[in-house]
Image (spheres, helix red, strand yellow):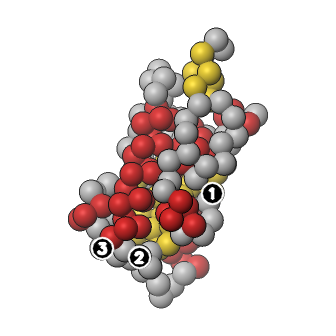
């Protein structure tokens, strides 16, 4: 597993699993879902090379822009990495608040993320269309605004 590095510092692996942690979820990729998703993809795709990217966002309810911050930190590296590595494929994954990050980044927004009852905030889809086409699947579990 790699740590969050700039896209220029990453090798061109066959597949990259980018994970956005759930609300208050510990760990780089997320103890509850991210580590397991990365391990499963790695196991299933052997002998292909698989890297991971831990989306940098607070994953905290006290930070109203957490999803938007995660959206940018997921979409920007994937877009840059897609340009640098034309054969690389992407598997964005997220749990809880991280699922909202993924959902919005791939352009399938489930609706507004309510930061307060009176202040809905929608995060725009951010993957470049070419990057979106190279996302083979996505794993989003427990999207708060879809409940």
Report x, y in % for residue 120.
62, 21
Residue placed farthest to the right in the image?
A: 147
**Residues marked 2 and 1 touching at CB (< 8 Å):** no
Residue 3 appearing in the image: no
- Tell me the crowding category of disc 2: few under 14, some 14 to 19, or many 20 or more residues within 10 angstroms, Cα based: few
Report x, y in % for residue 133.
57, 67
Residue placed farthest to the left in the image?
A: 9
The numbered dot on residue 139 is 1
The numbered dot on residue 117 is none
Report x, y in % for residue 1.
37, 66
Using the numbered discs, state the Cα–Cα distance from disc 2 to disc 3 in whole angstroms. 12 Å
Q: Secondary structure at mark 2?
A: loop
Q: Earlier in the sequence, mark 1 or mark 3?
A: 3
Q: Nearer the viewer, residue 143 or 90?
A: 90
Q: Nearer the viewer, residue 44 or 133?
A: 133
Q: Quadrant of residue 13?
A: bottom left
Instruction: Choose mark 2 or mark 1, whichever is in front.
Output: 2
**Residues marked 1 and 3 touching at CB (< 8 Å):** no
**Residue appearing at x 32%, y 54% in the figure:** 4
Q: Nearer the viewer, residue 96 or 126?
A: 126
Report x, y in % for residue 82.
41, 67
**Residue appearing at x 39%, y 46% in the figure:** 73
Using the numbered discs, state the Cα–Cα distance from disc 1 to disc 3 in whole angstroms. 23 Å
Q: Quadrant of residue 87?
A: bottom left
Q: Which residue is mark 3?
A: 11
Q: Secondary structure at mark 1?
A: strand
- Vertical placement of 48 versus 66: above or below? below
Q: Which residue is mark 2?
A: 86
């Amino acid at each position: 597993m790699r740590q969050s590095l700039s896209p220029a510092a990453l090798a061109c692996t066959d597949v990259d699993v980018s994970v956005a942690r759930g609300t208050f979820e510990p760990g780089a990729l997320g103890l509850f879902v991210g580590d397991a998703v990365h391990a499963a993809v790695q196991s299933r795709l052997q002998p292909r090379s698989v890297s991971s990217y831990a989306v940098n966002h607070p994953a905290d309810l006290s930070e109203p822009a957490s999803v938007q911050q995660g959206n940018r930190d997921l979409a920007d590296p994937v877009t840059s990495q897609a340009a640098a590595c034309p054969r690389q494929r992407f598997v964005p994954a997220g749990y809880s608040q991280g699922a909202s990050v993924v959902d919005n980044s791939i352009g399938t927004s489930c609706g507004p993320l309510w930061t307060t009852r009176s202040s809905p905030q929608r995060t725009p889809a951010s993957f470049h269309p070419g990057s979106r086409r190279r996302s083979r699947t996505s794993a989003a579990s427990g999207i708060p605004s879809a409940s």
